[in-house]
Amino acid sequence: MIPPIASRFVADTTASGTLEYVADCNDDELGAILNLLGEHYHERGPADEDADEYCRLVTELARRDLDGCISVKPSQIGIDVGPDVFAANFERIVEAGADEDVFVWCDMEDHTTTDTTLDAVEATARDHPHGVGVAIQANLKRTRDDLRRLSDVPAAVRLVKGAYDEPSSVAHQSKEAVNDAYEAHLEYLFREFDRGVAVGSHDPQMLELATDLHEEYGTPFEIQMLMGVREDAQRELARQGYEVNQYVPYGGKWMQYFYRRIRERKENALFALRAVVGV
Ligand code: FAD
C-alpha cells in the first residue's frame, strides 16, 4: 500500500489497485496514462520484467474496458543495457498495445537518449501507425529538428518543458527561454500536426495558448497532467469538454518519484509536511 503521504502522487503499489483508480478517473471524465515506476536498470532481467508487466497491463485495461493507455520510460525497459534491448522491449509492448487497441507513449529521458528513443519510436510507429507517441522536450535546442523529423512519422507528440538538468551546450537554461521555446514549438505543432497534439503541462499560460491555437488551426489536442498536480483544474477542464488525460504512476518503487515531486515545488513540500504533522 502507498502511505497516505505519497498517495496524492502515486496511485497504488499494485496494477489491480491502480486500475480501480483509473475507473474512478474515468467516472470524472479523465483518461489515464499509466506508468509503472522504475528506471535506470543496468541488467536485462528487470527491464524484461517491466516490459512483461506493461504487456499484461494493456490486456487488463482492455478487458476492463477502461479509458487508459500507458507511458514507458526507455531506461526502464533496457536503454542502459543496450539500444537493441530497449528497441526489442518497446516493440513488443507496442505490439501488445496494438493487439488490444491500447495506445503506448514513450517518455523522454536525458539528451543522451534522444536519438535512440526516437529511432525506436519511429520504427514501431511505421509498423503500428497511430498506436504510439513520444514526449518531446522544449528545453532541448535540437527539438525543432526532432519535430520536423516526426512530422513524417505516424506517431503522436506530447510536448513537455523538460524535466532533466541538461548542459547549456544542448539546452536552454532559463525558465523564460524554456517557456519561449515551448510556445514556439506548440505553435509549430498546431500548424503542422493536424493529426493532433498532446499538451503535457500544468502551466495555465500554455493551456490558454493551446486553446487559442486550436481555434486558429482547428488541430485537435489533449491535455496531459500529472496525478496530484492541479487536480481541480484537470476535472474542471474535463467538465468543460476538453480531453484531459492524467499521468498516473504506480508500483512499489514510489519513493524516488514522490521525493522528486515534493522537491520541485514549495506547495508540494508544504502538502507533505501537513500530511506528516496532521494540520
Ligand atoms: P512549470 O514551468 O513547472 O510551472 C508553470 C506554471 O504551472 C506554474 O507557475 C503554475 O502556475 C502551474 N503549476 C505547475 N505545477 C503546479 C503545481 N504543482 N501546483 C499548482 N500549479 C502548478 N518531462 C520529461 O523530461 N520527459 C517526459 O517524458 C515527461 N513526461 C511528462 C508527462 C506529463 C503528463 C507531464 C505533465 C509532464 C511530463 N514531464 C516530462 C515533465 C515536464 O517536462 C515538466 O518538468 C513539468 O511538467 C513541469 O512543467 P510545467 O509545464 O507543468 O510547468
Image (cartoon, rainbow, N blue to C red):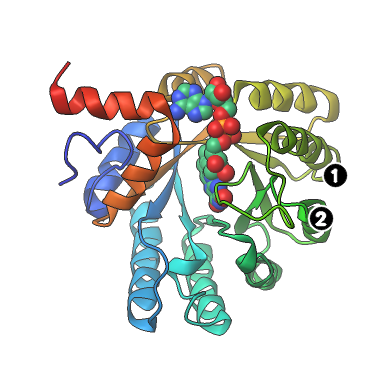
Q: Amino acid at mark 1?
A: Glu
Q: Amino acid at mark 2?
A: Ser
Return the residue at label 1: 192
Give the Cα distance between marks 1 and 2: 7 Å
Question: Observer-nearest residue: 216 or 201?
Answer: 201
Return the residue at label 2: 151
Image-based side of 106 in relation to 185, left or right: left
Vertical placement of 61 versus 216: above or below? below
The quarter of the rendering in which ligand 1 is drawn is top right
Label 2, secondary structure: give it. loop
Q: Are marks 1 and 2 in contact (CB under 8 Å)?
A: yes
- Looking at the image, can residue 66 be seen? no
Image-based side of 147 in relation to 21, left or right: right
Vertical placement of 119 versus 182: above or below? below
> Residue 20: percent from the left, percent from the top?
26, 42
> Residue 149: percent from the left, percent from the top?
81, 61
The response on whether ligand 1 sits within 8 Å of label 1 is no
Query: Which residue ends up furthest to the front in the rendered image?
Result: 168
